[in-house]
Image (cartoon, rainbow, N blue to C red):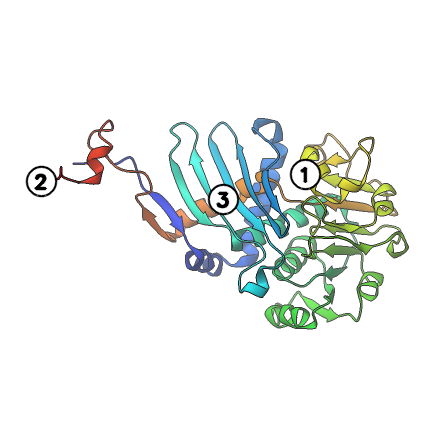
Amino acid sequence: MKNRIGLTRFLDCDAMAGLVRQVGILPLMQQMLVAMREDYVRWPEFEKSARLAVHSPVGVIELMPIADQNQFSFKYVNGHPGNPALGMPTVMAFGALADVATGFPVLLSEMTILTGIRTAVASALAATVLARKDARTMAMIGNGAQAEFQILAFAELIGIQQFYLFDTDPAATEKTIQNLRGFPAVECIPAMSAAEAMSRADIITTATADKTRAVIIRESDLRPGIHINGIGGDCPGKTELAAGVLEGARVVVQYEPQTRVEGDMQQLSAEFRPVELWEILAGRAEGRQSADEVTIFDSVGFSIEDFSALRTVWKLASIHDSGHTIELIPQLDDQKNLFGRLGISPPL
Protein backbone atom coordinates (compact mmCIF):
# COMPACT_ATOMS: atom_id res chain seq x y z
CA MET A 1 0.00 0.00 0.00
CA LYS A 2 1.50 3.34 -1.07
CA ASN A 3 1.79 6.21 1.38
CA ARG A 4 -0.82 8.53 -0.21
CA ILE A 5 0.69 11.98 0.15
CA GLY A 6 -2.09 13.40 -2.00
CA LEU A 7 -2.75 14.18 -5.63
CA THR A 8 -2.43 17.48 -7.44
CA ARG A 9 -5.59 19.04 -8.84
CA PHE A 10 -5.13 19.82 -12.53
CA LEU A 11 -7.21 22.37 -14.42
CA ASP A 12 -6.71 22.40 -18.18
CA CYS A 13 -8.43 24.90 -20.48
CA ASP A 14 -11.66 22.90 -20.75
CA ALA A 15 -11.84 22.51 -16.98
CA MET A 16 -11.20 26.21 -16.40
CA ALA A 17 -13.85 27.21 -18.94
CA GLY A 18 -16.28 24.77 -17.35
CA LEU A 19 -15.60 26.15 -13.88
CA VAL A 20 -16.17 29.72 -15.08
CA ARG A 21 -19.49 28.70 -16.65
CA GLN A 22 -20.54 26.79 -13.54
CA VAL A 23 -19.71 29.57 -11.08
CA GLY A 24 -20.58 32.40 -13.49
CA ILE A 25 -17.97 34.87 -14.68
CA LEU A 26 -19.47 37.79 -12.78
CA PRO A 27 -19.72 35.96 -9.41
CA LEU A 28 -16.18 34.66 -10.01
CA MET A 29 -14.95 38.22 -10.52
CA GLN A 30 -16.68 39.27 -7.31
CA GLN A 31 -15.01 36.48 -5.33
CA MET A 32 -11.62 37.20 -6.88
CA LEU A 33 -11.96 40.90 -6.06
CA VAL A 34 -12.51 40.05 -2.39
CA ALA A 35 -9.49 37.72 -2.34
CA MET A 36 -7.27 40.22 -4.15
CA ARG A 37 -8.20 43.05 -1.80
CA GLU A 38 -7.49 40.79 1.20
CA ASP A 39 -4.06 39.86 -0.17
CA TYR A 40 -3.06 43.43 -1.07
CA VAL A 41 -4.02 44.62 2.43
CA ARG A 42 -1.63 42.05 3.96
CA TRP A 43 1.15 42.97 1.51
CA PRO A 44 3.96 42.94 4.15
CA GLU A 45 3.29 39.23 4.83
CA PHE A 46 4.44 38.20 1.34
CA GLU A 47 7.90 37.34 0.05
CA LYS A 48 8.03 39.39 -3.16
CA SER A 49 10.33 40.09 -6.06
CA ALA A 50 10.11 41.54 -9.53
CA ARG A 51 9.43 38.83 -12.08
CA LEU A 52 12.25 37.07 -13.89
CA ALA A 53 12.02 38.09 -17.54
CA VAL A 54 13.82 36.73 -20.60
CA HIS A 55 13.47 39.19 -23.47
CA SER A 56 13.93 38.65 -27.19
CA PRO A 57 13.36 40.98 -30.15
CA VAL A 58 9.88 39.50 -30.65
CA GLY A 59 8.62 39.07 -27.09
CA VAL A 60 9.20 38.14 -23.49
CA ILE A 61 8.91 35.03 -21.29
CA GLU A 62 8.50 35.54 -17.55
CA LEU A 63 8.30 33.69 -14.24
CA MET A 64 6.29 35.32 -11.43
CA PRO A 65 6.77 33.78 -7.95
CA ILE A 66 5.35 34.89 -4.57
CA ALA A 67 4.66 33.31 -1.16
CA ASP A 68 3.20 33.96 2.25
CA GLN A 69 3.74 31.74 5.28
CA ASN A 70 1.23 29.16 4.05
CA GLN A 71 1.20 29.05 0.26
CA PHE A 72 3.58 29.58 -2.65
CA SER A 73 2.52 30.33 -6.21
CA PHE A 74 4.16 30.99 -9.53
CA LYS A 75 3.05 31.79 -13.05
CA TYR A 76 4.81 31.17 -16.34
CA VAL A 77 3.65 33.76 -18.89
CA ASN A 78 4.78 35.15 -22.22
CA GLY A 79 4.01 38.18 -24.34
CA HIS A 80 4.58 37.81 -28.08
CA PRO A 81 2.61 40.38 -30.14
CA GLY A 82 3.34 38.53 -33.39
CA ASN A 83 1.79 35.25 -32.22
CA PRO A 84 -1.72 35.75 -33.66
CA ALA A 85 -0.23 35.65 -37.17
CA LEU A 86 1.15 32.21 -36.23
CA GLY A 87 -2.17 30.99 -34.89
CA MET A 88 -1.19 31.37 -31.23
CA PRO A 89 -2.30 33.79 -28.49
CA THR A 90 -0.20 36.84 -27.68
CA VAL A 91 -0.28 35.83 -24.00
CA MET A 92 -0.06 32.19 -22.83
CA ALA A 93 0.27 31.14 -19.22
CA PHE A 94 0.13 28.35 -16.66
CA GLY A 95 0.77 28.32 -12.93
CA ALA A 96 0.83 26.40 -9.68
CA LEU A 97 -0.13 26.76 -6.05
CA ALA A 98 1.84 24.86 -3.40
CA ASP A 99 1.79 24.22 0.35
CA VAL A 100 4.71 25.98 2.04
CA ALA A 101 4.88 23.52 4.96
CA THR A 102 5.58 20.54 2.68
CA GLY A 103 6.32 22.01 -0.75
CA PHE A 104 3.53 19.88 -2.22
CA PRO A 105 1.89 21.38 -5.35
CA VAL A 106 -1.86 21.32 -4.63
CA LEU A 107 -2.89 22.94 -7.93
CA LEU A 108 -1.52 23.01 -11.48
CA SER A 109 -3.61 25.22 -13.71
CA GLU A 110 -3.91 26.82 -17.10
CA MET A 111 -3.62 30.59 -16.65
CA THR A 112 -4.23 32.06 -20.08
CA ILE A 113 -7.96 32.31 -19.36
CA LEU A 114 -7.33 32.96 -15.68
CA THR A 115 -4.89 35.80 -16.40
CA GLY A 116 -7.54 37.48 -18.53
CA ILE A 117 -9.93 37.42 -15.58
CA ARG A 118 -7.38 38.37 -12.91
CA THR A 119 -6.01 41.31 -14.93
CA ALA A 120 -9.50 42.73 -15.31
CA VAL A 121 -10.25 42.26 -11.61
CA ALA A 122 -6.98 44.02 -10.68
CA SER A 123 -7.96 46.95 -12.92
CA ALA A 124 -11.34 47.18 -11.23
CA LEU A 125 -9.78 46.93 -7.77
CA ALA A 126 -7.56 49.93 -8.52
CA ALA A 127 -10.54 51.82 -9.94
CA THR A 128 -12.46 51.39 -6.66
CA VAL A 129 -10.01 53.85 -5.05
CA LEU A 130 -8.90 55.90 -8.08
CA ALA A 131 -11.89 56.48 -10.37
CA ARG A 132 -14.55 59.07 -9.53
CA LYS A 133 -17.54 57.54 -7.79
CA ASP A 134 -19.85 59.02 -10.45
CA ALA A 135 -17.89 57.50 -13.37
CA ARG A 136 -20.30 55.83 -15.82
CA THR A 137 -18.46 55.67 -19.16
CA MET A 138 -15.22 54.03 -20.28
CA ALA A 139 -13.13 54.08 -23.45
CA MET A 140 -11.67 50.67 -24.31
CA ILE A 141 -8.66 51.28 -26.57
CA GLY A 142 -7.45 47.95 -27.91
CA ASN A 143 -10.15 45.30 -28.35
CA GLY A 144 -8.06 42.15 -28.34
CA ALA A 145 -8.11 39.20 -25.94
CA GLN A 146 -8.35 41.33 -22.78
CA ALA A 147 -11.21 43.65 -23.83
CA GLU A 148 -14.26 41.58 -22.83
CA PHE A 149 -12.81 40.80 -19.39
CA GLN A 150 -12.04 44.46 -18.71
CA ILE A 151 -15.50 45.56 -19.82
CA LEU A 152 -17.32 42.96 -17.71
CA ALA A 153 -15.21 43.74 -14.64
CA PHE A 154 -15.84 47.47 -14.89
CA ALA A 155 -19.56 46.94 -15.50
CA GLU A 156 -20.00 44.47 -12.62
CA LEU A 157 -17.53 45.83 -10.05
CA ILE A 158 -17.47 49.58 -10.77
CA GLY A 159 -20.88 50.26 -12.30
CA ILE A 160 -19.74 51.52 -15.70
CA GLN A 161 -22.70 51.54 -18.07
CA GLN A 162 -21.39 52.64 -21.48
CA PHE A 163 -18.21 51.51 -23.22
CA TYR A 164 -16.75 53.28 -26.25
CA LEU A 165 -14.61 50.82 -28.22
CA PHE A 166 -11.76 51.48 -30.64
CA ASP A 167 -9.18 49.23 -32.24
CA THR A 168 -7.09 49.72 -35.36
CA ASP A 169 -8.56 46.35 -36.41
CA PRO A 170 -12.35 46.85 -36.82
CA ALA A 171 -12.86 43.07 -36.69
CA ALA A 172 -11.54 43.06 -33.11
CA THR A 173 -14.11 45.66 -32.10
CA GLU A 174 -16.91 43.70 -33.75
CA LYS A 175 -15.72 40.51 -32.01
CA THR A 176 -15.93 42.24 -28.65
CA ILE A 177 -19.40 43.62 -29.33
CA GLN A 178 -20.69 40.20 -30.42
CA ASN A 179 -19.18 38.41 -27.41
CA LEU A 180 -20.82 40.83 -24.98
CA ARG A 181 -24.19 40.98 -26.67
CA GLY A 182 -26.79 39.82 -24.18
CA PHE A 183 -25.06 41.10 -21.03
CA PRO A 184 -27.76 43.51 -19.84
CA ALA A 185 -25.48 45.92 -17.95
CA VAL A 186 -23.10 46.40 -20.89
CA GLU A 187 -23.63 48.87 -23.73
CA CYS A 188 -20.81 48.75 -26.28
CA ILE A 189 -20.53 51.62 -28.76
CA PRO A 190 -17.92 51.53 -31.55
CA ALA A 191 -15.89 54.70 -32.06
CA MET A 192 -14.22 55.92 -35.23
CA SER A 193 -10.98 56.83 -33.46
CA ALA A 194 -9.23 56.57 -30.12
CA ALA A 195 -9.69 60.32 -29.67
CA GLU A 196 -13.45 60.01 -30.16
CA ALA A 197 -13.70 57.18 -27.64
CA MET A 198 -11.61 59.02 -25.06
CA SER A 199 -13.54 62.27 -25.46
CA ARG A 200 -16.68 60.55 -24.11
CA ALA A 201 -15.11 58.63 -21.24
CA ASP A 202 -14.76 59.03 -17.47
CA ILE A 203 -12.25 56.14 -17.50
CA ILE A 204 -9.80 55.24 -20.27
CA THR A 205 -8.42 51.70 -20.51
CA THR A 206 -5.54 51.09 -22.91
CA ALA A 207 -4.78 47.47 -23.82
CA THR A 208 -2.67 47.50 -26.96
CA ALA A 209 -0.24 44.70 -27.78
CA ASP A 210 2.53 46.10 -30.00
CA LYS A 211 5.98 45.99 -28.40
CA THR A 212 6.81 49.60 -29.18
CA ARG A 213 6.98 53.02 -27.57
CA ALA A 214 3.51 54.06 -28.67
CA VAL A 215 1.62 57.16 -27.57
CA ILE A 216 -2.05 56.32 -27.20
CA ILE A 217 -2.83 59.12 -24.72
CA ARG A 218 -1.36 62.63 -24.92
CA GLU A 219 -1.71 65.56 -22.58
CA SER A 220 -4.28 67.06 -24.98
CA ASP A 221 -6.53 64.00 -24.44
CA LEU A 222 -6.85 64.63 -20.71
CA ARG A 223 -9.82 66.16 -18.95
CA PRO A 224 -10.14 66.98 -15.24
CA GLY A 225 -11.12 63.94 -13.19
CA ILE A 226 -10.24 61.29 -15.77
CA HIS A 227 -8.91 57.92 -14.59
CA ILE A 228 -6.51 56.02 -16.87
CA ASN A 229 -6.13 52.27 -16.59
CA GLY A 230 -2.97 51.52 -18.59
CA ILE A 231 -2.45 47.78 -18.98
CA GLY A 232 -0.65 47.52 -22.33
CA GLY A 233 2.73 48.97 -21.38
CA ASP A 234 4.20 45.95 -19.61
CA CYS A 235 7.81 45.40 -20.66
CA PRO A 236 10.92 47.46 -21.43
CA GLY A 237 10.48 49.46 -24.62
CA LYS A 238 6.66 49.11 -24.60
CA THR A 239 4.60 52.14 -23.58
CA GLU A 240 1.19 53.70 -24.27
CA LEU A 241 1.17 57.05 -22.45
CA ALA A 242 3.12 60.22 -23.19
CA ALA A 243 5.58 61.01 -20.41
CA GLY A 244 3.83 64.31 -19.75
CA VAL A 245 0.58 62.48 -19.00
CA LEU A 246 2.23 60.68 -16.09
CA GLU A 247 4.15 63.71 -14.86
CA GLY A 248 0.95 65.67 -14.33
CA ALA A 249 -1.07 62.89 -12.68
CA ARG A 250 -1.30 60.79 -9.53
CA VAL A 251 0.32 57.51 -10.57
CA VAL A 252 -0.40 54.25 -8.76
CA VAL A 253 1.53 51.03 -9.40
CA GLN A 254 1.57 47.46 -8.12
CA TYR A 255 5.26 47.06 -7.25
CA GLU A 256 7.50 50.02 -7.99
CA PRO A 257 10.77 48.14 -8.74
CA GLN A 258 8.98 46.16 -11.47
CA THR A 259 6.86 49.00 -12.88
CA ARG A 260 9.84 51.33 -13.11
CA VAL A 261 11.44 48.89 -15.57
CA GLU A 262 8.37 47.61 -17.43
CA GLY A 263 5.54 50.14 -17.13
CA ASP A 264 4.87 53.50 -18.72
CA MET A 265 6.85 54.86 -15.78
CA GLN A 266 10.04 53.62 -17.49
CA GLN A 267 9.99 56.98 -19.30
CA LEU A 268 10.38 58.96 -16.07
CA SER A 269 13.37 59.81 -13.91
CA ALA A 270 14.18 58.03 -10.66
CA GLU A 271 13.04 61.13 -8.75
CA PHE A 272 9.39 60.57 -9.74
CA ARG A 273 7.64 58.73 -6.92
CA PRO A 274 4.44 56.75 -7.51
CA VAL A 275 2.12 55.29 -4.88
CA GLU A 276 1.84 51.50 -4.54
CA LEU A 277 -1.71 50.14 -4.65
CA TRP A 278 -1.36 48.19 -1.41
CA GLU A 279 -0.62 51.41 0.49
CA ILE A 280 -4.01 52.84 -0.52
CA LEU A 281 -5.94 49.63 0.16
CA ALA A 282 -4.28 49.26 3.57
CA GLY A 283 -5.10 52.87 4.49
CA ARG A 284 -1.49 54.08 4.46
CA ALA A 285 -1.99 56.48 1.53
CA GLU A 286 -4.88 58.29 -0.12
CA GLY A 287 -6.50 57.21 -3.36
CA ARG A 288 -8.23 59.87 -5.45
CA GLN A 289 -7.74 63.18 -3.65
CA SER A 290 -10.15 65.41 -5.57
CA ALA A 291 -12.84 65.26 -8.24
CA ASP A 292 -10.59 67.03 -10.76
CA GLU A 293 -7.45 64.97 -10.15
CA VAL A 294 -6.11 62.87 -13.03
CA THR A 295 -5.27 59.38 -11.78
CA ILE A 296 -3.33 56.60 -13.53
CA PHE A 297 -3.04 52.91 -12.72
CA ASP A 298 0.21 52.00 -14.48
CA SER A 299 -0.48 48.28 -14.43
CA VAL A 300 2.06 45.67 -15.50
CA GLY A 301 0.56 42.77 -13.52
CA PHE A 302 2.10 41.45 -10.32
CA SER A 303 2.40 38.01 -8.76
CA ILE A 304 0.17 38.79 -5.77
CA GLU A 305 -2.75 38.99 -8.23
CA ASP A 306 -1.92 35.53 -9.58
CA PHE A 307 -1.73 34.24 -6.01
CA SER A 308 -5.23 35.60 -5.35
CA ALA A 309 -6.56 34.13 -8.59
CA LEU A 310 -5.04 30.69 -7.99
CA ARG A 311 -6.28 30.40 -4.42
CA THR A 312 -9.75 31.48 -5.55
CA VAL A 313 -10.02 28.86 -8.31
CA TRP A 314 -8.42 26.17 -6.12
CA LYS A 315 -11.18 26.69 -3.56
CA LEU A 316 -13.92 26.72 -6.20
CA ALA A 317 -12.48 23.77 -8.11
CA SER A 318 -12.41 21.74 -4.89
CA ILE A 319 -16.04 22.65 -4.14
CA HIS A 320 -17.23 21.81 -7.66
CA ASP A 321 -14.76 18.93 -8.24
CA SER A 322 -13.50 20.62 -11.41
CA GLY A 323 -10.68 19.20 -13.48
CA HIS A 324 -9.08 16.02 -12.25
CA THR A 325 -6.29 14.91 -9.94
CA ILE A 326 -2.92 13.72 -11.22
CA GLU A 327 0.14 12.06 -9.72
CA LEU A 328 2.44 15.01 -10.39
CA ILE A 329 4.61 13.94 -7.44
CA PRO A 330 5.53 10.23 -7.17
CA GLN A 331 3.70 8.34 -4.44
CA LEU A 332 6.11 5.84 -2.88
CA ASP A 333 6.01 3.04 -0.32
CA ASP A 334 9.57 3.98 0.64
CA GLN A 335 10.33 7.71 0.21
CA LYS A 336 14.04 6.88 -0.20
CA ASN A 337 13.35 4.51 -3.10
CA LEU A 338 12.62 6.89 -5.97
CA PHE A 339 14.35 4.59 -8.47
CA GLY A 340 11.89 1.85 -7.61
CA ARG A 341 9.03 4.00 -8.95
CA LEU A 342 10.38 3.41 -12.46
CA GLY A 343 9.45 -0.24 -12.26
CA ILE A 344 12.35 -1.38 -14.42
CA SER A 345 14.32 -4.58 -14.19
CA PRO A 346 18.05 -5.03 -14.75
CA PRO A 347 19.00 -6.02 -18.32
CA LEU A 348 19.36 -9.75 -18.89
- Seen in the picture, residue 274 relative to 86 is either above or below; the reply is above
The one of 149 and 236 positioned closer to us in this rendering: 236
Residue under numbered circle 1: 254
**Numbered marks: total:** 3
- Say what amino acid the circle numbered 2 marks: Leu
Q: Which mark is residue 295?
A: none
- Seen in the picture, residue 193 relative to 68 is either above or below; the reply is below
Identify the residue shown where x is 24% and y is 32%: 338
- Say what amino acid the circle numbered 1 marks: Gln
- Seen in the picture, residue 132 relative to 25 is either above or below; the reply is above
The Cα atoms of the two marked residues, 3 and 2, are separated by 48 Å
Q: Decide: few, some or many residues near mark 2? Use Cα within 10 Å; few <14, some 14-19, many ≥20.
A: few
Q: Which comes before the other along the chain, label 3 or label 2?
A: 3
Closer to the camera: disc 2 or disc 1? 2
The one of 3 and 81 positioned closer to us in this rendering: 81
Q: Which comes before the other along the chain, label 3 or label 1?
A: 1
Picture coordinates of residue 52, whole percent (x, y): 58, 37
Residue 3 horizontal side relative to residue 20, left or right: left
Closer to the camera: disc 3 or disc 2? 2
Residue under numbered circle 2: 348
Residue under numbered circle 3: 310
Picture coordinates of residue 67, whole percent (x, y): 52, 32
- Say what amino acid the circle numbered 3 marks: Leu
The Cα atoms of the two marked residues, 2 and 1, are separated by 61 Å
Q: Which comes before the other along the chain, label 2 or label 1?
A: 1
The quarter in which the N terminus is drawn is top left
Picture coordinates of residue 162, whole percent (x, y): 74, 65
Picture coordinates of residue 225, whole percent (x, y): 85, 50
